[in-house]
Image (cartoon, coloured by chain):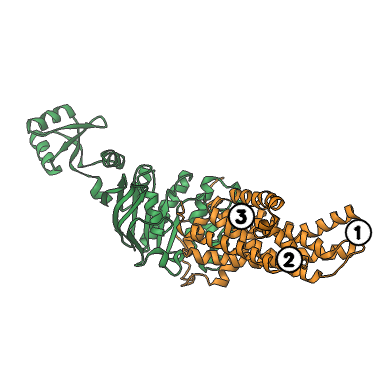
Amino acid sequence: MSTTLAPAVVPAAGSTARRTGPSLPGLIGLEIRKSLSTRSGRSVAALAVLVGPLGVLLATMTSGGGVVAAMALGIMGMLIALVLLALGVLSTAGEWTHRSVQTTYLLVPQRGRVLAAKAVAMALLGLVLAALGVGAAVGALALFTSGVSWFAAGQAVVAVIASGAAFAVIGAGIGAAVGNSAAALTGTYLTLLGILPVLNSVEPEVAAKLDPASAIVTLAQHGAATTPIAVIAGWVVVSTVAGVLVTRRRAVA
Amino acid sequence: MITVSGLTKEYGGRTVVDRVSFELEPGTVTGFLGPNGAGKSTTMRMITGLVPASSGTATVAGRPYTSLPNPGAVMGTLLDAAAVHPGRTGRTHLRLLAATIGVPATRVDEVLELVDLTAAGGRRIGGYSLGMRQRLGIAAALLADPPVLMFDEPANGLDPEGIRWMRDLLRGHAARGGTVLLSSHLLGEVEHTVDRLLVIGSGRIVADGPIGELLAGDGTAVRAADPASFETALSQAGLEVHHRDGDVLVVPGAGPERIGALAAAGGHALIDLRPSEQGLEELFFQLTDAR
């Protein structure tokens, strides 16, 4: 590319920069913009919305009807949550992978504040995207599936939306702790889709206290709420604390 | 504007930056030189808090960088031009930074114009050349028109015109009262850009002073119409004579006044007579090889 640089006299911005750093709501908005400003972020967000209705259509075509909405929404909710987990991982680990974290912490050096903003941003994005996804899944059930039992469908919808937000936050925490997108995603999915199901087959009572994905299905199906909520909350707390502790100590090379 | 005091970094018992201290004043461009692994980048990262220091302090405008209310408005920093998300466009990247610092979005177009990236602003950064990424990094550093600039190897990937432009930019910034810290491997470029040199070797500051003083020698460089005859005259006067660049005679320990007087007394015609200076490259290797 040929270079025709302007005369190197920097136009003064006239002290238009803020005297203080961005407010927490401002930082949250920025993190949401960041997540949706890349193709990967937008693709994951779109997948989170579409995986529910697509799953319902697939289930309808294969089963032919007679679906219990709460169970179907619980399974779709688990898929939505697993996709939103990736959005959370990309929001934190993605910055370490691409080293854009350097710019982030140069402009806002308070790492805990940045992580808090990321967690809230992911919770909000998770809420909205899970709501859209489960709404589309309910619409697909109503339009294309015959013989649907709608008992406890309302609780299932609430469980799916809350779980979507929680999983996005869990992803952000894991991504911050691991600091590498590929490693964080591979490790987390291997745990959730490999190790915990195996554990469930040999020690179901132990798995029920550890597996956040199956906790969503249990919650959505009007089952006992205490253990599933505690499991998901435990993952949120542990991953977030790990993310904060590791990020605060990690040098930005 | 930048004060560094006893800054030290140890990794597993190995000291990579050892009690580095310096103070940079407004209105100056300071070159930060040293071989690979000497500790330049680690020092710059410690100044910004990206890498925690083992001991020592660094302040920018009187405060630790991490305590500045809006650090991007005080110091524009370019440490690694590749540290950007390749999936964003250049303009989106700058708009996100502008929103973080709190400058109007119109400033993004101004700095894109300044670094000649207006046309490429809508393209993904992943498709940028190294030179374009450097210019994007410089644009990001200039967003708030901060009083302090700190650039680590900003000339990497820039073409000769870009390098000259950057030199004018940094000189202009200092002329307006700004403070600039610049690290570079391009010694010739540094020599023409900076007022002051900081040379670091094996983690320690080995030279710190105005570039003119550091490059000044203690003798005279002289060219005579008849070099052999004048060399004999100088030797007879008890002076040591070295040769440089063919017919230049370098006489350590004697000023131009004495050499001129000797030439006049002996009837030697001189073509050139000046205080001897060593090149920056020579000084660099002398200081850093010795460590």
**Gap in angstroms between the C-alphas marked 3 and 2:** 42 Å
Of the residues shown, which amino acid type is indicated by label 1? Answer: Gly
**Gap in angstroms between the C-alphas marked 2 and 1:** 23 Å
Q: What is the display colour for chain B?
A: green
Q: Is residue B105 visible?
A: no
Q: Which mark is residue B89?
A: 3
C-beta proximity under 8 Å, tags 3 and 1: no
x and y percentages locating residue A217 in the rendered image: 75, 61
- Secondary structure of the residue carrying numbered label 3: loop
Depth check: give the residue in front, B183 or B192: B183
Chain letter of mark 3 equals B
Nearer the camera: disc 2 or disc 1: 2
- Secondary structure of the residue carrying numbered label 1: loop
How would you rate the neighbour count of disc 3 (Cα within 10 Å): few for under 14, some for 14-19, many for 20 or more? many
x and y percentages locating residue B9 in the rendered image: 35, 52
Of the residues shown, which amino acid type is indicated by label 2? Answer: Leu
x and y percentages locating residue A132 in the rendered image: 75, 65
Q: Residue at x 48, y 55 (%)?
A: B138
Of the residues shown, which amino acid type is indicated by label 3? Answer: Thr
In the visual, does A39 lie left or right of B206? right
In the visual, does A92 lie left or right of A60? left
Q: Which mark is residue B282?
A: none
Q: Which mark is residue A65?
A: 1
Looking at the image, is B255 positioned above or below residue A93?
above
Nearer the camera: disc 3 or disc 1: 1
In the visual, does A201 lie left or right of B175? right
Residue at the far top in the pictured view: B228
Depth check: give the residue in front, A75 or B277: A75
**Gap in angstroms between the C-alphas marked 3 and 1:** 47 Å
Q: Residue at x 45, y 52 (%)?
A: B79
